[in-house]
Image (spheres, rainbow, N blue to C red):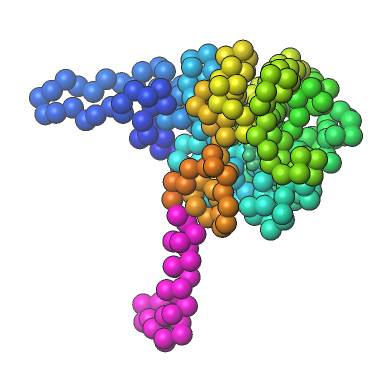
Amino acid sequence: MTQLSPAQNPPADGTPAPKTPAPGGPAAKPASDSSKKALYGGKSSRRVTVRDIAAAKERGEKWPMLTAYDAMTASVFDEAGIPVLLVGDSMGNCHLGYESTVPVTMDEITMLSAAVVRGTERALIVADLPFGAFQESPVQALRNATRLVKEAGVGAVKLEGGERSAHQVELLVSSGIPVMAHVGLTPQSVNAYGGYPVQGRGEEAAQQLLRDAKAVQDAGAFSVVLEAVPAELAAEVTRSLHIPTVGIGAGIGCDAQVLVWTDMAGLTSGHVPRFVKQYANLREVLGSAAKDFAEEVVGGTFPAQEHSFR
Ligand code: KIV
C-alpha cells in the first residue's frame, strides 16, 4: 500500500543530506553503509526489527516514534520514514473519546493495531497492552500479547511498569514476543496518581526510576519509554542502560523521542502537555476545509459540473 522514499530524507546522524554535484564538480558518492542502515532516512525493503533498534543504540543514532491508530495515518507516517509506530492506549483519549487510557479494551486495541499493520510496510508496529490486560499475571500478559501478535500482526508489545511488571516482560520475551517497557509516568495509573504528575523528582524517586528501568532491561525488554521525567535523570538512565530509551517529556538525552500524533500535528483540542511540540495545525486545516465544503453546499456551488456525471 505504501511506497517509501526515506532516502530523500536527511540521514539521522545529523550529517547533511547529499547534494547534487555542481556541473563539472566531483561525482556524488554512493550512500555510505551507515546511511543505508539508519532507522530514519535509511533504505529498507523490509520491516524494521528489534535488532535494528539495538544496532541504532550501538551507533548512537537517535530515532523518532509516533503513535498511530488507523491505516491511513499510519501509511502517511510509514511513507515519511518513521521507523517505529506505537498503537498506544492513548487511542482512548485521542481516538475513541474516552477521558483516559483506562477504559481501552483488548478488542479495541487489537482491531486498530491490525489496521495500522495493514497500512504500513516498513515500520515496526508496537501495540500497547491496555489496563487490565497484563497486571493479573505473566500468563494473562502472554495470552493477550499473543493475541496482538497473531490477530493483529504486530512486531512487539508495550506494557507499563518497571519492577512490578518485570515478570510479565520476562515471560513474553522468553516466549518470543519483543517488549517495549514504559516507566516514569504510567498513564494507566491516573486514578492512583490523581492526575499526571512528573515522576522521579527527589533522590528516592530517582533511585526507584533507575531500578525500574534496570529491572525491565534485565527482564529482556528491547527498549523502554521514559515518560514525564526530569531531563537530567532521563539522560542518566539512558547512559546506564544498553537498551534504548524513548523519551516523552524526558528531555533531549534519550535515545529516541515519541509523541502522540494528534498532539504533534495539532489536531488535539484543549490542553496539551508542555512537552508537546506542534508541527502543524491540522485542527484548523480540517475545520476550515469542512466549513468551505458546507458553505458551497448551502450556497449551491458544490457540486460543480466537473464533479457531476452526464
Ligand atoms: O499510549 C501512548 O501513546 C503511549 C505513549 C505516550 C508513549 O504510551
- In front: 298, or 79? 298
Residue located at (39% from left, 83% from top): 301
Dividing the picture into quadrants, the one containing residue 305 is bottom left
The quarter in which the C terminus is drawn is bottom left
Q: Main secondary structure of the magenta part?
A: helix
- In front: 94, or 31? 94
Q: Is residue 105 magenta?
A: no
Location of residue 20 in the rendering, given as x and y in whole percent from the top left corner: 21, 30
Which corner quadrant of the figure contains ligand 1? top right
Compared across the picture, whether 91 is left or right of 80 comes to: right
Compared across the picture, whether 211 is left or right of 261 comes to: right
Compared across the picture, whether 184 is left or right of 286 comes to: right
* In this view, 189 is above or below 47: below
In this view, which residue lies farthest toward the front? 202
Location of residue 155 in the rendering, given as x and y in whole percent from the top left corner: 66, 32
Q: Is residue 308 magenta?
A: yes
Residue located at (72% from left, 56% from top): 98
The answer to whether residue 246 of the structure is visible from this angle is: no
- In front: 73, or 217? 217
* In this view, 118 is above or below 123: below
* In this view, 241 is above or below 7: above
Residue located at (31% from left, 28% from top): 17
Q: For the magenta stretch, what is the residue range?
A: 281-310
Location of residue 8 in the rendering, given as x and y in whole percent from the top left corner: 35, 35
The answer to whether residue 98 of the structure is visible from this angle is: yes
- In front: 300, or 28? 300
Report the number of numbered marks. 0
Residue located at (76% from left, 40% from top): 193
Compared across the picture, whether 258 is left or right of 5 comes to: right
